[in-house]
Image (tube, grey):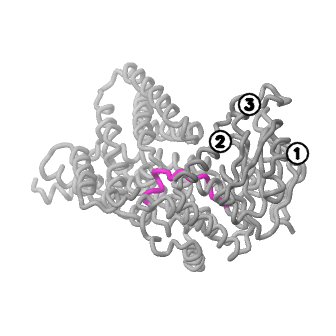
């Protein structure tokens, strides 16, 4: 099969649309993850999703069901319990380890083929079915629409919670909105890059964007563009040269962040006393 | 209509009385300094006015109505700790969030640009409005924070420690700016501070909170030896320097023996030593 024929196969086509949907949602939500300094929560929710997926496999359900239930549950838990910055790390850490423990239990109880576990951990982008693709696309569109509708209050509560509260904005409600968006985005991103590499689309593009821009709208746009580029280029390289697609996506996104940091400084150096 | 009226207000957090029997009024276009030891409940007073904390007793009227969260006619500047997340935002965007940051949806407000530009111009921020906050000096950031708080030209403006962490030159600039905002917009302004001296030239009234009590009046009616001695329950002396600065002696006993005559012995308000005297000493000797 020639390379151009390979690109037109249905599994590569499905993969293309899946990475596109995921990159849109992850780039947008990732900007708020970086702005709110909640990378640890993003990391934890991914790992919690692993337990959910393992539990769903054990019960004979689709992994995405378990992912949704566990990620949303963890998101709400962290959103409520960790609304106060002082408690946040502890709440996230305890949620993370409790879920991972459950995941270990579910895997030990599961006697079937371990491939399902492997694909949850490292992504299974070339195995996305049309059914999965529809779910991923719908969830991603929902996330992007929700981010655009809540953009200003989410930004306000993220950068200055005290002033936002004084203006009558509930920072607890915004924390819940954010954690819900993060949970859903994590679920779709896991389809592409897996639990262990979810950061590559959720944090690296947004972190790069925050370094090179000064305006929130620009940062959001650049984060989405970097995520899209990483996802498309990663898929292309994986198909062209072999090797896991999630490896290529991770490598490109990380390189993007590194390049942003090494580029001529725009603000870190200008910081005055 | 007074911008602010307190009638026998008390505030309790849990089972702890923060202060009680607070009765006072603030005049339109006046500047009031809120003074008192750390932990006395100065920021709490602002939060009561904002409607974030409900009083346990008494009643207050904010611009003639009950306090309500998110009243655009009440501006608020929180105690400044520039969060990491704020460093990458430009001054213009931050002031813009003060204007429509609580609005959901896609719509844009047609007059946002004009309102934000007016606030930037009033506070002297226009020339550095497109720089990220992380690149600004402390005094510049306080100007931006004032623009954010005053973007609607509120009738009541609450400022929590706007002079904290600034050098003397920057303090003087911010004091002038507060006075300018009062003169331009006619807002009544309440300033929480730990030292009266930098503000003395613009302040009309003083609210002094100590030992769970609130005293309010003209500067000399409150900051005098008799009133403060009664408030603290031990002798306090006030000296005025040749430059008109007030040096208050006797407050330090409050920290060595907290509440020697207090009626409430399970009280656990933490009070740190006043910055007052050391700072004045530094000013006078530098």
Q: In the picture, residue B77 is in which quadrant?
A: bottom right
Residue B139, given in percent of the width and then of the height, sits at 51, 62
Letter of the chain that mark 3 sits on in the rendering = B
Marks 2 and 3 on same chain: yes
Q: Quadrant of the image for the C terminus of chain A?
A: bottom left
User: Which label number is shown at residue B258?
Assistant: 3
Front label number (2 vs 1): 2
Q: Which of A216 and B247 is in front in this view?
A: B247
- Name the side, left or right, on which A34 lies relative to A163: left
Q: Residue furthest front?
A: B242
Q: What element carries label 3?
A: loop
Specify few, some or many for label 2: CA neighbours under 10 Å numbering under 14, 14-19, or 20 or more.
Answer: some
Residue B209, given in percent of the width and then of the height, sits at 77, 46
Check if residue B160 falls in the magenta segment: no
| Residue B27 to residue B44: above or below | below
Q: Is mark 2 on a helix, strand or loop?
A: loop
Q: Which of A255 and A3 is in front in this view?
A: A255
The residue beneath circle 2 is: B274
The residue beneath circle 1 is: B21
Is residue B10 visible in the rendered image? The answer is yes
């Amino acid at each position: 099969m020639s390379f151009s024929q390979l690109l037109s196969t249905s599994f590569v086509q499905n993969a293309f649309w899946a990475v596109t949907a995921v990159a849109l949602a992850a780039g947008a939500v990732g900007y708020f993850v970086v702005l709110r300094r909640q990378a640890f929560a993003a990391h934890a929710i991914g790992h919690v999703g692993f337990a959910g997926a393992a539990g769903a496999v054990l019960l004979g359900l689709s992994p995405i069901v378990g992912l949704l239930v566990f990620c949303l549950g963890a998101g709400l838990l962290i959103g409520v319990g960790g609304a106060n910055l002082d408690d946040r790390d502890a709440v996230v850490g305890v949620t993370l380890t409790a879920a991972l423990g459950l995941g270990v239990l579910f895997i030990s109880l599961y006697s079937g083929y371990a491939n399902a576990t492997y694909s949850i951990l490292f992504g299974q982008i070339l195995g996305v079915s049309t059914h999965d693709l529809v779910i991923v696309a719908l969830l991603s569109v929902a996330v992007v629409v929700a981010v655009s509708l809540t953009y200003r209050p989410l930004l306000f509560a993220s950068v200055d919670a005290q002033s936002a509260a004084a203006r009558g904005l509930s920072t607890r409600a915004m924390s819940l909105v954010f954690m819900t968006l993060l949970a859903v985005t994590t679920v779709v991103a896991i389809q592409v890059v897996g639990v262990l590499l979810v950061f590559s689309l959720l944090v690296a593009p947004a972190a790069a964007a925050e370094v090179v821009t000064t305006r929130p709208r620009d940062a959001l746009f650049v984060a989405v563009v970097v995520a899209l580029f990483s996802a498309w280029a990663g898929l292309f390289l994986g198909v062209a040269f072999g090797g896991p697609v999630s490896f290529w996506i991770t490598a490109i996104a990380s390189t993007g962040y590194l390049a942003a940091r090494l580029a001529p400084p725009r603000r870190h150096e200008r910081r005055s006393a | 209509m007074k911008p602010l009226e307190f009638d026998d207000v008390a505030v309790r957090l849990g089972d702890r009385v923060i202060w009680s029997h607070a009765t006072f009024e603030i005049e339109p276009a006046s500047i009031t300094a809120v003074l008192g030891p750390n932990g006395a409940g100065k920021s709490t007073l602002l939060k009561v006015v904002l409607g974030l904390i409900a009083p346990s007793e008494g009643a207050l009227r904010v611009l003639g109505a009950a306090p309500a969260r998110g009243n655009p006619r009440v501006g608020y500047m929180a105690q400044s700790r520039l969060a990491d997340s704020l460093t990458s935002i430009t001054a213009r965007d931050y002031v813009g969030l003060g204007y429509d940051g609580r609005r959901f949806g896609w719509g844009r407000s047609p007059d946002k640009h004009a309102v934000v530009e007016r606030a930037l111009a009033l506070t002297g921020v226009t020339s550095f409005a497109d720089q990220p906050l992380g690149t600004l000096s402390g005094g510049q950031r306080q100007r931006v924070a004032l623009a954010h708080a005053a973007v609607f030209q509120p009738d009541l403006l609450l400022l929590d420690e706007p002079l904290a962490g600034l050098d003397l030159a920057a303090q003087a600039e911010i004091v002038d700016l507060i006075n300018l905002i009062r003169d331009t917009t006619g807002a009544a302004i309440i300033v929480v501070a730990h030292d009266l001296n930098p503000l003395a030239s613009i302040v009309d009234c003083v609210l002094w909170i100590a030992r769970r009590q609130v005293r309010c009046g003209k500067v000399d009616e409150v900051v005098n030896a008799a009133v403060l001695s009664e408030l603290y329950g031990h002798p306090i002396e006030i000296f005025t320097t040749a430059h008109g600065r007030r040096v208050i002696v006797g407050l330090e006993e409050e920290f060595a023996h907290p509440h020697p005559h207090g009626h409430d012995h399970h009280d656990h308000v933490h009070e740190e030593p006043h910055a007052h005297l050391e700072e004045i000493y530094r000013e006078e000797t530098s």
